[in-house]
Image (cartoon, helix red, strand yellow):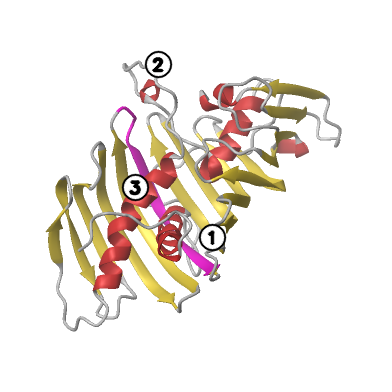
Amino acid sequence: MLRKFNAARGSTPYRRVAALLFAFLWGCGGGGGGGGPAGLTPPPSTPVAVTANNATRVSATALKPAVGGGGALTTVTGLETTAAPQTRAVTLALLAVARDSKTQLSASQGVVGATAQTTPCAVSGSVTADISADGSSGTITFNACSDIAGETLSGSASATGVSFDGSRFRGNFRIDVTFTVTGFAPLRMVGDFSIDETCNTSNDCTSSFTGTSLGAQQGNETWFITNFAINEALVYSTQNLTVTFNYTVSSTALNGSVAVTTSTPVQMQTSARHPYAGVVVATGTNSSKARLTVIGSDPTAPGQVQIEVDADGNGVYESSTLYSWSTLDAL
């Protein structure tokens, strides 16, 4: 089994991996029912009022499931660090899942009567795979698996209805995994969802991720997204990513929920920590809103994000403040 992940970020093999990793992320789709993922206690889901006092936290929470990152060790009681927040924490975790999941699914095609196999991971730990002969379904268990020094994955992933015809990839996925990177709080993700992705010969890809529920927990924060649709389009030659998303996010950081939409698509480079353009609106009780406009992607420069507040829900934003990304990262 191949243990290195050498495909170019925008190549067709990489996008197939990315399809798997996003599928493993975004909650319950297809014929799935309501409710939160098993094993995670959902945060309060009552909509909150958006005010000038909580608008930055509302905005940071709105972005986190789709394009944000995770907290540093400061999120763990009793631990302190000056390290910057972990960037794109969920993507890193799902890439770790996808490396072995895709390899095992592909390797099992045409193998009749295959039984569960346990193989060592590149650095430490092991992975156990029980895959159907045609590679369209299976269950993979990660036993403190580390393929990259400093990263460890534990838990399980399952896939059903996987199909790939050379340009279009589809499947239904479910995970319960914990991903740990040295220096950061462990990230646990639980959920299932459906994916539909198409890539052309230039390795430009469009992807659709839909579902009803996903739970995630890192440090002292738990968030859920429900009734979600996340769509992305990658231009391989420029490595530019366009993302649109709609969901309701509930979080312990908010002690409630807000509905999130992208009124202007979010634009970012695949290698960047933050987007460089886009408008996202978070709506709370009585149509109160926070509107976040991305001005730039510099992680520390001032004035990279504009947050406007319509606290009374009358459609008029009565306040507007500029923030740095570092301010939102700290929330």
- Residue 46, visible in the rendered structure: no
Q: Residue at x 40, y 60 (%)?
A: 17
The earlier-in-sequence mark between 2 and 1 is 2
- In the rendered structure, which amino acid carries the disc numbered 2? Thr
As helix, strand or loop, the secondary structure at mark 2 comes to: loop
Mark-to-mark CA distance, 2 and 1: 35 Å
Pinpoint residue 103: horizontal percent, then vertical percent.
28, 64
Pinpoint residue 34: horizontal percent, then vertical percent.
50, 58
Q: Is residue 326 left or right of residue 259?
A: left
Look at discs 3 and 2 and give the one toward the viewer: 2
Residue 274 or residue 143, whichever sits in front: 274
- In the rendered structure, which amino acid carries the disc numbered 1? Phe
Residue bearing the label numbered 1: 209
Q: Quarter holding the N terminus? A: bottom left
As helix, strand or loop, the secondary structure at mark 3 comes to: loop
Pinpoint residue 106: horizontal percent, then vertical percent.
30, 71
As helix, strand or loop, the secondary structure at mark 1 comes to: strand
Residue bearing the label numbered 2: 82
**Cβ atoms under marks 3 and 1 closer than 8 Å:** no
